Image (cartoon, helix red, strand yellow):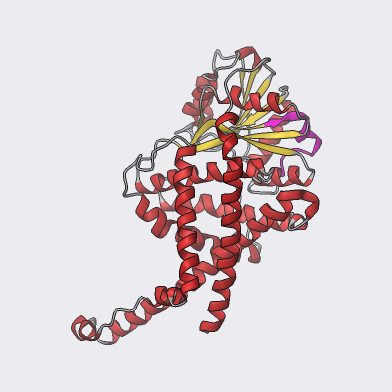
Amino acid sequence: MNTVISIILWIAYVVALYFSVFLVLVYLDKKRLFSIEESADKISKFPLVSVLIPAYNEEKTILRTLESVHALDYPKDKLEVIVINDGSKDNTEKVIRTYIKNKPHFQLLSHPNRGKAASLNRALNLATGEFFACLDADSFVESSTLKKMLQIYEKENNPNLAIVTPAMKVYQPQNMLQKVQWLEYLVIILISRLSSHLDSLYVAPGPFSLYRTAIIRKIGGFDEKNITEDQEIAYRLQQHQYLIKQCTNGYVYTTAPPELKPFYHQRRRWYLGGIACLHQYRKLVANKKYGDFGLMQMVKNVVGFILAVTGIIIAGYFFVLPLFQTLKEMIMVNFNFMPYLQTLKIKITFLNFLLADFRKGLIILFLFIIGGFFFYQAHRNAKEKILGFGWVPLIPYFAFYYTLKGIILILCMVEFVRGKKVKW
């Protein structure tokens, strides 16, 4: 058994090391551009922009979302806001109607629950903007972000540039789970920045990604059968070889799930949708026709799922099974701990196994150094302090958080194989 696990670990080490070193090299190569690529909020023209806001049971957050759009530093006669009430069962529609009264550039669409993609498509059919942005009803955009994103379209001057994505942060995290997600999102901003340089972005975040309207209509709008329409549309655009760029300082804020149950449901939808997208666009994997996206990003996405599952299974073999065995022994002796403590030998089995070979230990150390390097650079990139919320959130982030996500991923893979469906 140890031989099999050793082989699996070596494969995992080599793959993780390869992609980690690759990202470091990309960062070092592109770092010189970071100081000059940030967008300003000055543009030479003001195209008409439509903002589409789908909402389902968002009475607690929709008002702040609408206020952030109304406060955009952009001419109101060049802004069209379409809010879609997707069959909400709470007071979402009432809050929207009250707020948009006497605001002629806002309009409300209401229909029975159809899902996010269907809501966006309905609004897209009515949108008149040259560009349109999607904004989740639990997210809030900085006033200068729209201009910064449009400047990228203006600077690139490329008709094949289909999407400009924002830099997304967690909005005012309150509890430990939200603060841990805040750390995660900062790392994602940096990784997305590097992926943007490689033309390898594979998701257009729901909070305020900005689309070129004609291109999205040309490829048929959003996929109403996919539960992660923001991933699917990005995969489809990559398949048609359109471009997606990130606005590195165009900030938008999203409300992170404050409790484990909504967190689980959110990640379950993300992971099931991600697996479905990989399966749907599997022909792009390792396909040189699609450049870095096919040869690197698609391969990395597939390998990422495999490594996460492998890591959880191995950790379970070395940690969870021995724990159950110890519990079984305690039950047999009616939880009489004294004889057990007298004969207890401290065994760090998993670490001993990993570090028994100097080469394995060296690789692990190197991976930790790379992880720490990106964690530090992610905060610099997002202009945030590592201890912005103290040092305590760092413990669950590094010790438990990715294990939790890995467990959810395994459950999602089982559900995908079983063909279970999830609605938005």
Residue placed at 71% from the left, 50% from the top?
Answer: 292
Residue placed at 68% from the left, 46% from the top?
Answer: 200
Q: Position of residue 356 (x, y in %)?
A: 44, 77
Q: Position of residue 81 (x, y in %)?
A: 62, 23
- The residues colored magenta run 211-224
The foreground one among 394 and 21 is 21
Q: Position of residue 296 (x, y in %)?
A: 68, 54
The foreground one among 386 and 57 is 386
Residue placed at 53% from the left, 41% from the top?
Answer: 189
Using the rendered image of the protein, determine whether residue 86 is visible from the camera's viewpoint. Answer: no
- Verify whether residue 122 appears in magenta: no
Whether residue 156 is situated above or below residue 320 in the rendered picture: above
Whether residue 237 is situated above or below residue 309 in the rendered picture: above
Query: Would you say 76 lies left or right of 367 here?
Result: right
Using the rendered image of the protein, determine whether residue 358 is visible from the camera's viewpoint. Answer: yes
Q: Position of residue 272 (x, y in %)?
A: 61, 56
Residue placed at 69% from the left, 19% from the top?
Answer: 48
Q: Quadrant of residue 47?
A: top right
Residue found at the very far left of the displayed protein: 338
- Verify whether residue 218 appears in magenta: yes
